[in-house]
Structures are given as C-alpha cells and as structure tokens.
Image (cartoon, rainbow, N blue to C red):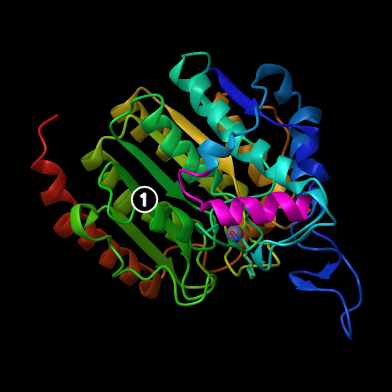
C-alpha cells in the first residue's frame, strides 16, 4: 500500500482568533483559544513524524484551488466577500467562522490539497491518501461559512473527480461527529455522488442531519444520515459502518470514496459527546478499505475536518493512517486501555434503533434505485 500525505505549514497559519471554544472573546468572555486552532492538527502531524510513519508516506504537495473550482459550489458574492475580508483584516465567513488576514489563500490551499490527493489516486501515484488540511469544509454553504468551514473541501474534491477526472460515481462518507450539511446540499438531487453522514443526533448544525432526509428527485435515496445518540462508542460506529455504510457503498459502486474525516467523535472531544477510541478508528478505516478494495480498487481519500482534543486527536489520527498504509509503528495509544475499558462502548439498543432505520433507508430507498442502473 502506498499512502499519500497532504500537509502544508501554511494550513497552520489560518487564524481563528481569540475565543472560548467557539464563542468569540469579548465582554464577559475572556480571550482564550478558539477550538479550531492549529494545535490538534500540528500534534497529529508531529506524532505521524515522531512515530516514524511519515518516512513511509508519499508527500503530495497541495495546490491552491482556482476560483473557478470554488465556484462549482459557492456563489461569486461569497467568494468575493471572503477574498476582500482576507485581504484586509479578516472577519467572519458567516456563522462561527472567524478568520484572519490571508485565510482566503489558505482556504484555497485546503480545498486544492484535497483535489491534489484525488489526482494522485487517479493518476496511480498512491493507493490511498490522507489530506490533513485546515480550515475544514463540511459545513460550508454556497453563500455562507459555517462551523469553522470556509469552502466545501471534500465536496469540491468530489466535483473535481467527476467534472475534471471524468469519474461517473463518487461517494462521500462523513464520519466527523457533526452533520455533513454541505455535501448533503451540494448533491441533494445528484445520484452520481452518494453522501453518507454519521453524526451526533440533533447537535450541529441545528435541525440538520435527520434520518428521513434522503435526497430528492433523481437523488432520492442517495443521501444517508445516521444521527447517532450522544454517548455512542466503538460498537455503534462499527455497526453503522458495517450495516449502513458498507451496503450503501456496495450498491452505489463509486469509483472513488472520499471520507470527510473529522476525528471529533473521539472520547475526549470538547465539541461532541461520543466515545470513539483509536482502536475503533482503526477498525472503521479497515472496514472502508475493505469495501473500497471491493468496489474501486481501494481508492480512498480522507480529507481532515474537525477534531479538538489536543491529547487524543493525534492517537486517533495515527491509528487511521497506520491502517491506511498497512504500517504498524509500535507507538501505543496511552489512552486506549482507559477508553477501551469504559462502560457502554458496545452497541446499545437506542443506538441500534437509529442504525436499523438507516439500514432500512439503504434497502428501501437506495438499493432499488441503484439496481435499476446496469454497470
Ligand atoms: C460548531 C459549534 C458547535 C460545534 C461546532 C462544530 C464544528 C465542527 O467540528 N464541525 O465538524
Ligand atoms: Zn465536527
């Protein structure tokens, strides 16, 4: 296995300003760190280096997306607004998405980095890839930055794969703990791009990611939401991947699988309430690799999204990249003994209920529509 690695120091220079988590500093809010700061991602990258794994990865240099590429999803006025604010003193892209000077170019480099990874896979330079980009993208809307996201990195990478590289079918699996509303909107009526999101139910964005939301028109059945109850752990996530994601991918048979890889379902995350540990992330990666092997010669690109535990993101991320590359570094997750042993890691009945609903949507709404298409 050759695994590509997208990283650029400039990603770390995207400034999300002073905040208390996600609330901007000011008034009674003492200036502190914004949750989406360089720390977690830099530490993830550093652990990949210190573990020795980085030496075995193929560095894929990121390029900046062009304005034309960004306009495949975003409206001109929005792009113009970000560009102008970025050239001045920064501002807010919309909802909870502060940025400083120069972030327009960095956001272009994030979207472009995901496209670089897609190109490397399609060109056969690497078998799979992890793009550790910043800022994230999966909440971005055509006219609005949301939830720390400026441009729809993963969705734009799917559009690049389709429109420039000529792929017929692409799938996006979003395992960030928050709902992948951006890709859902982008491909709502499009059966060519299957969108699946696993997320904490009823959390962020508000009133988004319901299990009933399955796409419309030609795209009906091609959007799958799995809103998991808070407290879900390894059992629920592995079950969702085995019983919902895998059959959906088998039915759709994408030629490329993209993962919106937020690692914020981890057991220590300050912006979510799930319990996933590194061994579960490893297993989840394995499940996706197996189905990718089956349907698209293993073509799998992970684009980083959220993940806010400085302590735990690096170990969850290392587990994912170890599995992708087939290399075991011997670095042990010092948290695993604890989180692996906490109660309620196994699938609970109320979690099973949601997974069963999503399973039914795959069988009743997606399967009949994919089986009509001969391929
Ligand atoms: C935005 C406000 C509360 C949760 C936060 C989510 C950002 C994120 O990681 N999205 O994937
Ligand atoms: Zn998230």
Residue 221 seen in the figure: no
In the displayed structure, 52 sits above or below 81; it is above
Name the element at disc 1: strand
Residue range highlighted in magenta: 71-86
* Location of residue 233 in the rendering, given as x and y in whole percent from the top left corner: 52, 61
Q: Is residue 35 left or right of residue 137?
A: right
Q: Is residue 30 left or right of residue 1?
A: right
Q: Is residue 354 left or right of residue 327?
A: left
* Location of residue 255 in the rendering, given as x and y in whole percent from the top left corner: 33, 29
* Location of residue 54 in the rendering, given as x and y in whole percent from the top left corner: 72, 24
Which image quarter has ligand 1? Answer: bottom right
Q: Is residue 115 magenta?
A: no
The residue under the point 26% across, 35% down is 253
Point out the residue furthest to the bottom here: 28
Which picture quadrant has residue 64? top right
Q: Is residue 211 left or right of residue 58?
A: left
In the displayed structure, 351 sits above or below 238; it is below
Pointer 1 local density, CA inside 10 Å: few below 14, some 14–19, many at least 20: many
The residue under the point 10% across, 32% down is 374
* Location of residue 42 in the rendering, given as x and y in whole percent from the top left corner: 79, 42
The residue under the point 89% across, 68% down is 32
Q: Which residue is mark 1?
A: 195
The residue under the point 11% across, 50% down is 368
Which picture quadrant has residue 81? bottom right
């Amino acid at each position: 296995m050759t695994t590509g690695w997208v990283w650029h120091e400039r990603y770390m220079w995207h400034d999300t300003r002073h905040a208390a988590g996600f609330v901007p500093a000011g008034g009674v809010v003492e200036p502190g760190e914004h949750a989406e700061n360089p720390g977690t991602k830099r530490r993830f990258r550093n652990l990949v280096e210190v573990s020795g794994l980085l030496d075995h990865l193929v560095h894929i240099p990121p390029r900046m997306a062009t304005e034309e590429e960004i306009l495949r999803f975003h409206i001109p006025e929005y792009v113009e607004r970000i560009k102008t604010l970025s050239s001045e003193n920064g501002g807010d892209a919309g909802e909870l998405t502060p940025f400083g000077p120069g972030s327009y170019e960095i956001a272009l480099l994030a979207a472009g980095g995901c496209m670089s990874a897609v190109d490397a896979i399609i060109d056969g330079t690497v078998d799979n890839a992890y793009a550790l980009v910043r800022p994230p993208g999966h909440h971005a809307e055509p006219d609005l930055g949301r939830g720390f996201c400026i441009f729809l990195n993963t969705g734009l990478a799917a559009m690049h794969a389709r429109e420039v590289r000529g792929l017929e079918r692409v799938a996006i699996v979003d395992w960030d703990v928050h709902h992948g509303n951006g890709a859902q909107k982008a491909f709502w009526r499009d059966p060519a791009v299957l969108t699946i999101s696993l997320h904490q139910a009823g959390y962020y964005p508000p009133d988004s990611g319901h299990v009933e939301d399955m796409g419309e028109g030609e795209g009906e059945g091609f959007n799958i939401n799995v809103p998991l109850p808070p407290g879900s752990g390894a059992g629920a996530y592995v079950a969702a991947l085995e019983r919902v994601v895998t059959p959906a991918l088998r039915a759709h048979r994408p030629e490329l699988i993209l993962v919106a890889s937020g690692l914020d379902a981890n057991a220590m995350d300050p912006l979510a309430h799930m319990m996933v540990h590194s061994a579960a992330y490893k297993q989840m990666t394995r499940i996706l690799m197996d189905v990718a092997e089956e349907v698209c010669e293993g073509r799998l690109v992970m684009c980083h999204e959220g993940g806010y535990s400085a302590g735990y993101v690096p170990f969850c991320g290392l587990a994912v990249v170890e599995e992708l590359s087939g290399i075991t570094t011997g670095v042990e997750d010092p948290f695993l003994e604890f989180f692996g042993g906490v109660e309620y890691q196994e699938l609970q009945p109320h979690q099973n209920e949601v997974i069963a609903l999503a399973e039914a949507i795959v069988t009743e709404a997606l399967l009949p529509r994919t089986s009509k298409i001969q391929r």
